[in-house]
DNA sequence: CGACCCATTGAGAGCATTCAACGCGTGTGG
DNA sequence: CCACACGCGTTGAATGCTCTCAATGGGTCG
């Protein structure tokens, strides 16, 4: 933990260096040659660390940059025409913010830091130019976009059929997996979002989220202390998430 | 109608010509110059018209081509590990099939024609090369990908919070809008999918779909004859879809 | 200390699912 | 030509999950 925060302070003070970034294998430049990474690195703008609740981008403002999360976490809150606020995404280290803004040319939701968070800024226009010259970067970006389409579509269609119990299990396992891929423990992690945020993301009320988490604890699937989560039995949790929740008639 | 089928027959017999396609302004080459369209056109492979229930691609098989729908419609069925089948997408004329397959290198669901359907095949590798040389095509493809991310994410997160009544209203309005953009009537259209398909897509049972459609008809919002739909009051339907369905507490 | 946000708990109501049955049209085979 | 199976859509009744509303307690910040 001390090591991590030291790296971050250095990064935000001295400018970011992709070659020494511990997220290298997860971020956009993962397939690039040494020279290409240097060029990619040259695009990036320094960006001061965000405090809790601070906004990285505001819904509707012109899109100019993607952001890569270095540490911390953020949520994307989209306000509908009828003034309803939906949490449409969470972002963890190594993930790209703003992919949904490219088409409209404006950010599609307000991006809020859930805790102290640092990001890399990637101005889109020069990034696109570089994509023209570097096929592997172009493919990497398109793959990230494509992966996002599949992931979101599949995950959300599945959730539409599920009970609260299964929705939360899917959510916790997805988070666990994202942490695992980034070298953190898949069993123990800190979730900086509130129950209301989770509920909004999953289409549940905060009360139902709380009650369901309580049920997990009674079944010894999960231990929670505040916002520290500990998954006690990944196998059983997986089986729970795979079960279709409703005893659904086969199509 | 006679005009349409004549054009399609010609296209599938003589090879496809983007310059005379009535979907030109909606498809990928919409921003290209005359020469670039010609080059784009050269990539395309002829593809025989699909019959009803015929499969365009099978889940898990290697990804090689995108497909643009010229006429007809298709559904994407994704089978989960627990052998559950979910309808994760519908495709109408002018839309691209396979965007979610780029990342994994394999089709993420089986693509089935819902009626007699013709498509253009776009081999991905040469398309990607062309993206390197033609910035406007590259941007167009990235915008399509980005739009898809935003559209899916937003639409589905909204649906997660909604009752059956509102889910179906959103669905019908989205379909109506897609037809309108393609020059067809937004009030009257043919939906080739079954109630079960719609239910699977929206996370509802076929019974609930039927009952809700019946309720619309009783309110004079909708008229249905078999699979012909007629939206009688778009304004009221819109208000119904905007209403949050559940009298949801503001976050 | 009070205001406020967050999380929890309880009780009641509503909406969608589940299960079962029926009608209809189509295609198949006797 | 008819019998039958099958897919699709519809209808009815009952169960159950989740929302709603209300109240409480803990924590943080001004």
Image (cartoon, coloured by chain):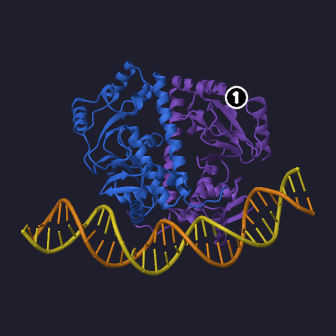
Chain colours: A purple, B blue, C orange, D yellow
Look at mark 1 in the image and give the residue it sits on: A45
In the visual, does C7 lie left or right of B52? Answer: right
Out of A207 and A156, give the one closest to the viewer: A207
User: Residue B42 at x, y = what percent?
Assistant: 33, 25
Q: Quadrant of residue B97?
A: top left
The residue that appears at 64% across and 41% down in the rendered structure is A94
Out of A61 and C9, give the one closest to the viewer: A61
The residue that appears at 58% across and 54% down in the rendered structure is A174
**What crowding class fits label 1: few (fewer than 14 Cα within 10 Å), some (14-19), or many (20 or more)?**
some
Q: Helix or strand or loop: what does disc 1 sit on?
A: loop
Out of A5 and B239, give the one closest to the viewer: B239
User: Residue C1 at x, y = what percent?
Assistant: 93, 63
The residue that appears at 35% across and 40% down in the rendered structure is B184
In the image, residue A81 sits, relative to residue A68, either above or below, namely: below
In the visual, does B187 lie left or right of A158? Answer: left
Identify the chain of the residue marked 1, using the numbered disc in the image: A
């Amino acid at each position: 933990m001390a090591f991590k925060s030291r790296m971050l302070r250095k990064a935000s003070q001295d400018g970011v260096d992709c070659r020494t970034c511990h997220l290298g294998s997860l971020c956009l430049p993962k397939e690039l040659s040494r020279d290409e990474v240097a060029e990619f690195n040259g695009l990036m703008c320094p960006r001061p660390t965000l405090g809790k609740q601070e906004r990285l981008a505001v819904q509707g403002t012109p899109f100019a940059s993607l952001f890569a999360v270095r540490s911390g976490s953020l949520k994307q809150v989209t306000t509908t025409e009828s003034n309803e606020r939906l949490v449409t995404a969470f972002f963890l280290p190594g993930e790209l913010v703003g992919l949904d803004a490219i088409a409209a040319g404006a950010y599609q939701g307000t991006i809020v830091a859930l805790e102290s968070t640092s990001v890399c800024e990637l101005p889109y226009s020069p990034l696109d130019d570089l994509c023209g010259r570097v096929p592997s970067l172009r493919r990497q970006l398109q793959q990230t976009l494509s992966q996002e389409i599949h992931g979101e579509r599949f995950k959300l269609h599945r959730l539409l059929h599920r009970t609260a119990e299964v929705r939360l299990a899917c959510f916790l396992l997805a988070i666990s997996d994202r942490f695992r891929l980034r070298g953190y423990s898949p069993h123990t992690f800190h979730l900086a979002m509130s129950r209301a945020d989770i509920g909004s993301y999953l289409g549940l009320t905060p009360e139902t989220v709380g009650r369901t988490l309580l049920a997990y604890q009674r079944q010894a699937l999960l231990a929670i202390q505040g916002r520290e989560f500990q998954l006690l039995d990944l196998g059983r949790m997986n089986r729970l998430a795979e079960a279709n929740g409703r005893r659904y008639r086969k199509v």
